[in-house]
Image: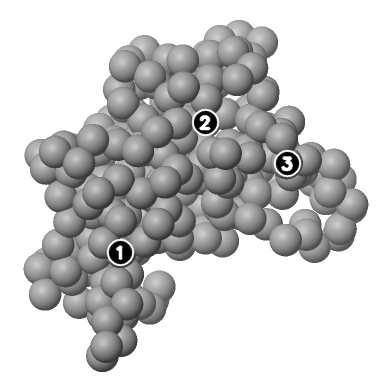
Amino acid sequence: MCGRIIQASPLLQLAIVDGLDVRSDSRGNHAPRYNGAPGQEHLVIRVNRKTGERSLDPIKWGLIPHWCADPKGGRKPINARSETVGTLPVFRDAYRARRCILPVDGFFEWQVTTSGKQPYAIGMKDRAPFGIAGLWENWKTPAGEWMRTFAVVTVPANALLARLHDRMPAILDPQDYERWLSDEENPRGVLRPFPVERMQMWPISERVNSVRNDDAKLLEPA
């Protein structure tokens, strides 16, 4: 699964897709997040299907399908399994027409031990930002206001992450960014475990367990 992320690089480094048009309203709203959690807004790369223009926009983590009738927005799943993302009603429409990329510097996972849960930070060996496959939705509140939300797609864990959990976020190879953001209805071929040799992970402080702690020291090896 994926339940915490790092999104701390400068804005233009997070714009990992060539030719991205970064909207001005995103420039002013970007503050580094070292412990990003569901329910918060994070920068997400989307495509305007009418114009083909790409943008980097703050969207809330926890997807509400456009057809949801619940005034509170319903269950708000944060993850979508790659095996069922194209068939489950809650994700199906967004998968076909509203895919996005969540640019991150890393994410967190926890290992169950005899003394509790040990948190780990996970990212690329070169510490560069990378893109995670996501889905986004427009939902109209009973008051008539539009709310934009997203979920992260997950795949079976690779050999590195399998030590901690049986799932991992669907990290996209850069050569697959274009395909994921295209109007192709079913680009499932890009949803696969990411190569182990390009990743690293290290144990960190249990301070990350509280979302109130959101600083660079969280990434220091424990």
Instruction: Return the x and y of residue 145 as percentages of the image width and height.
Output: 79, 46
Q: Amino acid at mark 3?
A: Leu
Q: Secondary structure at mark 3?
A: loop
The disc, 1 or 2, on the residue closer to the chain's N-terminal end is 2
Spatial CA distance of label 3 from label 2 is 18 Å
Q: Viewer-proximal residue, 81 or 5?
A: 81
Q: Is residue 169 left or right of residue 199?
A: right
Q: Viewer-proximal residue, 188 or 174?
A: 188
Residue underneath mark 2: 100
**Is 176 drawn above or below residue 91 in the view shown?**
above
**Is 97 drawn above or below residue 28 in the view shown?**
above
Residue drawn at (30%, 36%), measured in percent from left and top? 194
Q: Amino acid at mark 2?
A: Cys
**Mark 1 Cα-neighbour bin, 10 Å: few <14, some 14–19, many ≥20:** some
**Mark 3 Cα-neighbour bin, 10 Å: few <14, some 14–19, many ≥20:** few
Q: Is residue 1 left or right of residue 208?
A: right
Residue underneath mark 3: 88
**Mark 2 Cα-neighbour bin, 10 Å: few <14, some 14–19, many ≥20:** many
Residue drawn at (25%, 76%), measured in percent from left and top? 118
Evaluate whether residue 2 shows in this view.
no
Residue drawn at (66%, 10%), measured in percent from left and top? 50
Image quadrant in which the C terminus is located:
bottom left
Evaluate whether residue 206 shows in this view.
yes
Q: Amino acid at mark 1?
A: Leu
Residue underneath mark 1: 164
